Image (cartoon, rainbow, N blue to C red):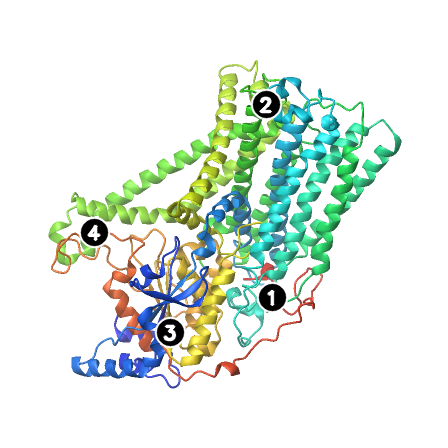
Amino acid sequence: MQPEALSAKGRTSPGRTDGPEGAAAQPSLELLVHGVGGATPEEMLGDPRTELVTGDRTAGIHRRRDDVRAEERAGERAGEAAGEQRGEGGGSGTEPVQEAYCWSNLTSGNGARALWLVLLPFMIANLAHWMRPAAPARHGAHRAYDILVRIFALTLTVQLVLAAGEVTLDLLAWQCAGSAHCVADKSWLGFMSAESGGWFGGPGRRLALAALVPVLLTALLWWLSRRTWSIYESAKPSPRAAAPGTAAEQPALSLPGFWYGRRLVARLRAAHTATGLLAVASALVAVTVQADDGTGGGLRATGWVLGALTAAGWVAVVALVCRSGRTEAEPDMGEDRRAVRALPLAALALLVAVLVHTAWSRPDWVSTGRLPGTSVFGGLAVAQGVLAAGLAVTGWALQRRATGEPPALRGLGGACVALLASAVAGVFSGGVAQRVADWLDRGATPGENGPLAGPPVVLSWQATAIPLIALLVLLLALAGGWRMWVLRRRIATEVAGLYPTEHRYTEDNDPRTGRIAGAIARARLTDDAPPALGAAALATLVLGAAAVLGAWLTGEVPGKAADGAPGPLPGLAQTGQALGSWMMGAGVILLLAMGRQAYRDPKSRRTVGILWDVGTFWPRAAHPFAPPCYAERAVPDLAWRTSTWTTRTGGCLVISGHSQGSVLAAAAVWQLDPDIRGRVALLTYGSPLRRLYGRWFPAYFGDRALAELDDQTHAWRNLWRLTDPIGGPVRPTPPDGRPSDVDRKPLKDPLAFERTAEHPLPAAINAHSDYQADPAFAVERAELIARISVAPAAPAEEWPRQVPRPAGEPAAETADGAAAQGRTGMSSA
């Protein structure tokens, strides 16, 4: 890249010395941020001798041992650089001191975190919150969208707790313990057998004991959420001055409170903990009310009172969820200790009363068939479908007012992702219930030819839909393969243009040409993901609705409901039910096997961690039991380090981010003071900022947000390759319409087509890796340093600091739960 191209923005800062020689007069630092999968400091710095200079083993800044005190030798380095440049007639100057920010342990640092795979539906639902289109901040559909997502997340918590209850309450305590045939070969269940005559032989006491499992599951989710909350959501943002203009006029990621969601997560955690306890209480109340129906007396009246109190608890939970909005205009230091503690404790007290009422002696009560109230799984499926449809409507309404390039799925991405979360949760709950029922029934088909009634009918119907969805996914994969083959043949004719000086080896049928064309074709398939996801989501919605309808109309499992039907329908129903049941169970077993392998093998643990690197970038704004947001620790870390180093040394700093690290780097630059931002350059490579985040999260990384980041950043350069399936051009369009110089033309990959003096062996096709090995990397970094302002920094003690509210003082809120003086996530654009 030529210097005249770099000056296209025409922005200079007072006191800046143009050119590499001037830039070398001040200390310069390159802060490296790795991408998905993680990297060690030794790998990032290319030196086995590294030291931790700040931070901890979870996330910290590392340097080469020889560079720990590099700033003290800045004058000596500058003199040597000037002498070298005078002797060589100029050049790009010396390389900056390098630091490596390693954050991989925030997501994949130990084996226990691999078990977060079980929380996959919660993580997916949380993503739906951030996928709303970039409509104007005052659009009324923002609030409706956020409320729908939070209620949808609430149904997933209910589904998980009731799935555990289905196994322990229904299959074990109600059906198996009440059947002499089922208990015959299970001595460990004998004390609960109805034939034993023991204290736990009655249905009520069996249910009360079995209810402890879903209660303990809820307690475990609460503990995990609170433990991670105290680590991730508690990282304070860096001090900074208030930006000009109102919060609604600023990009959401530039607001001081965006990465500080401590108060919101505490509220949602209280609501979802109470939800889990109330779900268990509701299941028990539904059973006892039916058992006491027609008997009269105090038990029946007590049951109705407990039912009314449970209903009141649900109203309180929904009200808290609906009014829990994000406050981003400033860090919300308030705490809702009474509300956060009162709701779960009240739900726990109510559950204890329900357990006592359930365990009360009822001599004539026997357990037959399925546990009453298990039809709630069908109701949950309907509720989730309706909520997803509501997200589609509000997303469409928001997209109609949005500007810029249309996002993925035209604003329906949140609805599609919500359906995906529902499908994954259904596989988890149905798979576990089907396999446990099959084990308890000694291999008989649950609900057909065995002594047990089996799991709820709707779960068997949903299992029958799994093979059809799997067939659709296979067809989509085949279509993708066909498209890649067609693209490869077309691209092969264009490879010669990438290597004009080596054209004699670029025939279309040359193996080297085919490999390069295949890499480019595979990279372009990433852009075909939205239609495939939309098709899968639509199929999930249609087949899910058909499953619920079939269960409600027939009341039988598909294989039994199809008896006597003409043609091959009975056989297809039997096959689909059995195959789907095994596929659901295999999916759960595969997930657990991945978690076990990740616990034992660090390499597998890093592979599992890649999933969380992508999915847990966003704060927990919808589901508090989702895996924690590592960016709420990483972004403040980067912003603090950038601010303190530039203020203390007055030097130039390049934040160099690869892949997901480029997203963290951009988010950190958004959080800097304008005067500090003038001395910071941004170098991104293999970046998904536009290709992934801009398309799927347009309200935060869309055209307007990236254009404003480009306008506010003094120096930004983005490197990408045609063969990269993740990274791509950023192409921000500035508000004034002038062209942006952020994106460099695509780098050659491989660097040489044939063997050359510089590459005596065939050059590798790097795709998404090894950007720093490209000669263009050092050139671009040197040019960025030459552009950065070198004006002296203000002393650290003179930083403009925000004055946080006292810990017990809540933010002033409007009726909708948002801070009156701040911007909320539901109105972000």
The numbered mark, 1 or 2, whose residue comes first in the sequence reads 2
Q: How many marks?
A: 4
Q: Nearer the viewer, residue 165 or 509?
A: 165
- Residue of label 3: 653
Q: Position of residue 114 (x, y in %)?
A: 47, 46
Residue type at the position of mark 3? Leu
Work out whether 534 lies above or below 662. Answer: above
Give the residue displayed 13% in from the left and 58% down from the top: 501
Mark 3 residue crowding within 10 angstroms, few (<14) / some (14–19) / many (20+): many
What amino acid type should be assigned to the residue bearing mark 4? Answer: Val
Lower sequence index among marks 3 and 4? 4
The alpha-carbon separation of the residues under discs 3 and 1 comes to 31 Å
Q: Which amino acid type is marked by label 2?
A: Val
Q: Secondary structure at mark 3?
A: strand
Residue to which mark 4 is pinned: 495
Residue 317 is labelled as none
Q: Identify the residue at horizontal 64%, vertical 48% (top origin).
A: 151
Given contact means CB atoms under 8 Å apart, are the residues at marks 3 and 2 in contact?
no
Secondary structure of the residue carrying tag 1 is loop
Callout 1 touching callout 2 (CB < 8 Å): no
Q: Which residue is mark 1?
A: 823
- In three-dimensional space, the C-alpha distance between marks 3 and 4, rounded to whole angstroms, equals 37 Å
CB under 8 Å between discs 3 and 1: no
Marks 1 and 4: in contact by CB < 8 Å? no
First along the sequence among labels 3 and 1: 3
Disc 2: which residue:
557
